[in-house]
Amino acid sequence: MRGMYEREKMLLGTLCVGLFLAVACQPSSLNQNTITESSTEFSTALGIDTVLEFSKALDKDKADKDKVATEEEKLDEEKLGDENTDTEFTLVISGDVLSHNSNWQAADLGDGRFDYLPQLGDLKGLLSNGDYTLVNLETPISGEKYGYRGFPKFNAPVNLGQTLKTIGVDMVVTGNNHALDNGLEGLRSNLDNLDRIGLDYVGTYRSQKEAQQAKVVDINGIKVGFAATTIRLKMEVPDDYSLNLNRESVIRREIAKVRQAGAELVVFHIHWGKEYKEEPSDVQKTLYKILAEEGVDIVIGSHPHRLQPIEMKEIVYQGEAKSQALIWSTADLLWGEPISKKYVKTGAVFQIKVVRENGKARVHDMNYDLIYNLTWFDENGKKQIRVIPESEMEKFRKTHPKEVREMEKEMEWAHGVLARSVDLD
C-alpha cells in the first residue's frame, strides 16, 4: 500500500510541475491579470480542481490505511501476548554437529577462508521447514587461536556456525561433553562467536548471572522454555555455573527456572547414554523418569551417535494427563570421522507440532525425515562430505552407486529403530 501511495504522489507532483512550467512560460508582455486568466484557463484544461481533490483524497486514504495498520499491529501484539489465544508452531530438531578433521579440511578454501555450505546446504529445506530450529553444536567454534581439529578435542572454524544460521538453525545446544575442549576461555569464546553470528544457545554460560537467566523464547505467541544438561566430562568443571551436569537436583532446578520465567511448554535437551548404542541405557531410563515426573513436554537426547527410538507418550503432571514427545537419541547431523562403526552416518530431522487450544499449549504430533552423511574421495584423494535427505538419494545413484547402496541399508535400519518402543522397567 505504501508503494502505491508513493507512486500516486509522484504522479501528482509531475502534474503540479507541469502546471508551474505552463504558467511560468507565458509571454512576458502579458499583464498580471492576463497571466492570472491564462493560468486559470490552463488550470481548467488540466483539471487542477480534480488534482487538488485527488491530493486530498490521497492524504485521507493514507491516514485511514495507517490507522488500520496500526490497529492491526496492536491487535497482533495483543494476540501474541494473550495466553488464551489459539495458535501453533512447528519445532524442528536435528542432531550432533561434529566437525572432524575431514570436515574442516573439506571446508578449507585454501586462502584462510572456510565454507561448510557444500556439506550442509542440502538440509536447508528441512531445517527451514518450521518456525524454530534447534541442533546440538558438539564442536565449539572458539576461534582460530585454538587451532582447528577434530576428535578428541574439537574446534571448528566460525564459518560452521555461520552456515548453520544460513540453513535455518535458530538455536544451538552448547551443553555437551565437548563444551570444555578448548578450556574455560574457549567455552566463552564459543558463546561470543555465536552472539556475533546471531545464533541463540543454551547449556553453557560465561558468568553466574548468565547461568541464572532462563531461556524462554516466544514462538508464534507461545512461551517455550529451553534447558540443557550433559553427562559428566572427563575433566573437572572449573566452577558451578559454566555447564549443567546430569544431576537430579540440576535437572529439576533448570525446569523450575524456565517455568518461573513464564514458560508454557518445556523443551529439555539432555546429553546422555552410551556411544554407538541403538537402545537406551539404564541411566537414560532413570534420568527420563525424572523428566517425566517434572512434566517436560519435549525430551531431546543426544550423544550415542546412533538413532534410538522416538515416542509420543502420555504422562501425568500435577494430576493432569498431557502428551509428550520423546527422542531418545537424535544421532548425528554432521559426521566425518573415519570409523568402521555402522549407522553413525545416519541421522534425522524431526518436526514436532505444538498447539495451544483453550489456553493450554501441548504437543500435537511428531514426524521425521532421515538424513545421511554421504562421503567419498575426490580426484585429489581428499575426503568430501555432503549431508543429504533420504528423499534426495536417487540423485546420487549414478555418481556414487556404492555409497547409495550403503545408504539404503542404513535407511532401512533407521526406520526400524525409530519405530521401536522402550521398556522402562
Image (cartoon, rainbow, N blue to C red):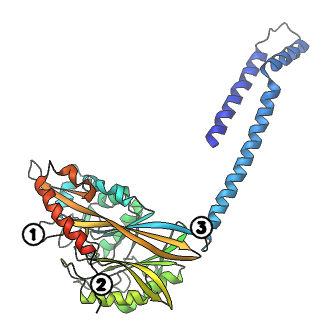
> What amino acid does circle 2 point to?
Val
Mark 3–mark 2 contact, CB under 8 Å? no
> What amino acid does circle 1 point to?
Ser
Q: Tally the numbered discs.
A: 3
> What amino acid does circle 3 point to?
Leu
Q: Crowding near pointer 2: few (<14 within 10 Å), some, many (20+)?
A: some
User: Looking at the image, can residue 343 be seen?
Assistant: yes
| The label number, if any, that marks residue 80 in the structure image | 3
Horizontal side, residue 401 vs residue 168: left or right: left
Q: Which quadrant is home to the N terminus?
A: top right
Compared with 121, 350 (above or below) is below
- Quick one: label 3 or label 1, which is nearer the N terminus? 3
- Quick one: label 3 or label 2, which is nearer the N terminus? 3
Q: Nearer the viewer, residue 332 or 418?
A: 418
The residue carrying mark 2 is 237
Compared with 249, 172 (above or below) is above
Horizontal side, residue 393 vs residue 215: left or right: left
Q: Position of residue 120 (x, y in %)?
A: 28, 57
Alpha carbon separation for disc pair 3 and 2: 40 Å
Alpha carbon separation for disc pair 1 and 2: 32 Å
Q: Which quadrant is home to the C terminus?
A: bottom left
Q: Position of residue 38 (x, y in %)?
A: 85, 14
Q: Residue at 20% of width from left, 67% of height from top?
A: 412
Compared with 391, 293 (above or below) is below
- Quick one: label 1 or label 2, which is nearer the N terminus? 2
Q: Nearer the viewer, residue 230 or 280?
A: 280
| The label number, if any, that marks residue 340 in the structure image | 1
Alpha carbon separation for disc pair 3 and 1: 50 Å
Q: Residue at 35% of width from left, 59% of height from top?
A: 126
Mark 1–mark 2 contact, CB under 8 Å? no
